[in-house]
Image (tube, rainbow, N blue to C red):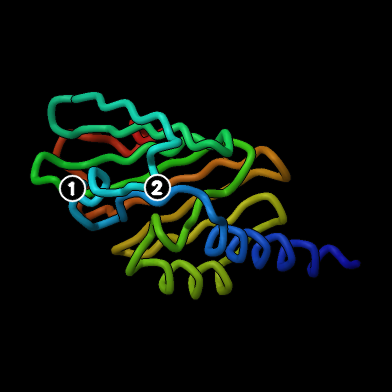
């Protein structure tokens, strides 16, 4: 296997696992956080809420061991999601209407076999890791509340 093939395999497997992983569902990027409250599949997950003044964070410990954080502005819309743990969460669910844009951008973006980065004006997705140790974040630059830095999204 050449070095050029390995990154493509990692990217495709990340997208495939992220879109098919059968873990709990949660609120979606760009959607109202109220969608989180109605998810019956979260009964096996631990959810913590913290108020950071200009936004709220839902920290969700999934049964798989992955921790997902959802960042919601005071208007209730999710402007960012982050994840870290042994498995990639359901990216199709997390990114919602932005998933196709991410998939297309990830295929076209330069990356190595441990990193995927999509930087577009309306969507940024950064993902890295290897088997059983993944992390990433996705955010909508135009939706980040004033005074909040991207560095706070961890």
Q: Is residue 136 left or right of residue 51?
A: right
- Secondary element type, mark 1: helix
Q: Is residue 97 left or right of residue 147?
A: right
Q: In the image, what residue occupies the spot 32% across and 46% down?
A: 80
Which tag, 2 or 1, sits closer to the chain's start?
1
Q: Nearer the viewer, mark 2 or mark 1?
A: 2
Q: Is residue 37 left or right of residue 130?
A: left
Q: Residue 144, position in %: x, y?
A: 21, 46
Q: Residues within 10 Å of mark 2 (few under 14, many from 20)?
A: few
**Would you name the residue on which mark 2 appears?**
41
Q: Residue furthest right?
A: 1
In which image quadrant can residue 14 be found? bottom right
**Would you name the residue on which mark 1 appears?**
34
Using the image, tell me which numbered label, if any, was put on residue 145.
Answer: none
Q: In the image, what residue occupies the spot 24% across and 57% down?
A: 30
- Secondary element type, mark 2: helix
Q: In the image, what residue occupies the spot 65% across and 43% down?
A: 129
- Quarter in which the C terminus is drawn: top left
Say above or below: 76 vs 2: above
In which image quadrant can residue 21 be found? bottom right
Say above or below: 111 vs 154: below
Pick the front one: 63 or 135: 63
């Amino acid at each position: 296997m050449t070095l050029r093939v390995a990154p493509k395999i990692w990217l495709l497997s990340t997208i495939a696992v992220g879109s098919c992983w059968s873990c709990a569902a949660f609120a979606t990027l760009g959607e109202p956080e109220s969608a989180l409250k109605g998810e019956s599949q979260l009964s096996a997950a631990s959810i913590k809420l913290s108020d950071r003044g200009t936004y709220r964070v839902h920290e969700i410990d999934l049964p798989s061991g992955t921790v997902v954080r959802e960042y919601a502005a005071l208007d209730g819309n999710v402007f960012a999601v982050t994840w870290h743990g042994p498995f990639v969460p359901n990216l199709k669910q997390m990114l919602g209407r932005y998933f196709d844009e991410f998939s297309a951008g990830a295929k076209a973006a330069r990356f190595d076999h441990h990193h995927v980065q999509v930087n577009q004006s309306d969507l940024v997705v950064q993902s890295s890791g290897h088997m059983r140790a993944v992390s990433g974040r996705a955010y909508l630059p135009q939706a980040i509340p004033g005074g909040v830095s991207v560095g706070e999204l961890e």
